[in-house]
Structures are given as structure tokens and as C-alpha cells.
Image (cartoon, rainbow, N blue to C red):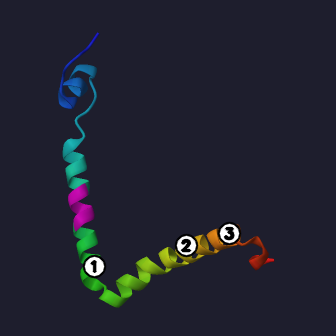
Amino acid sequence: MNIDCTPEEARAFLGLPDVQPMQEHLMKEMQERLSANLKAMGPNTMMNAWLPTTFKGFEQLQELFASQMNPSRTR
């Protein structure tokens, strides 16, 4: 059996609530909060908040690869 319907039609048929207005409201609120936080942060603060974990993880990945390529180097 193949049923061709939109997600809205399927929700209505199954009696599920329409959560789209709530999702739109939450997305709008998240966008407003993110914009406000980005405006409050300077570029340096933003980069320091986002990048240290990324760079540290990247360095650990490099060390892992290097240790696997040359096991005697780490011992």
C-alpha cells in the first residue's frame, strides 16, 4: 500500500497536533537570542569561545595520527 500525502495531511489523519506555530516561535526566539549574543561579543571573544576546543581536538587528532605512523616516537 502506498499513501501519497503531505506531512500536514498525515498529522491531521493520525490526530497529531500541529506544532509548526510553536516551532516557528521557538526558532524566532533562538535567532533573536543568538543575534543579541553575537552583537554583545567582540570578534576576539567570539573566536576564543568557539575555537579553542576545535584546535585542541585537532591537535589531539594530529598527535594520534603521528603516534600511529611512528609508534616509537611516543614511547
Mark 2 lies on a secondary structure that is helix
* Secondary structure mainly formed by the magenta segment: helix
> How far separated are the C-alphas under marks 1 and 3?
41 Å
Q: Amino acid at mark 3?
A: Met
> How far separated are the C-alphas under marks 3 and 2?
18 Å
Choose mark 2 or mark 1, whichever is in front.
2
Disc 3 target residue: 69
At 64% from the left and 75% from the top, the residue drawn is 63
Q: Earlier in the sequence, mark 1 or mark 3?
A: 1
Picture quadrant where residue 21 is located: top left
At 65% from the left and 73% from the top, the residue drawn is 66
Label ID, residue 57: 2
Magenta residues, start to end: 27-31
Disc 1 target residue: 38
Q: Residue furthest right?
A: 75
In the image, 41 versus 62, the foreground residue is: 62
The quadrant of the image that shows the N terminus is top left
At 23% from the left and 20% from the top, the residue drawn is 13
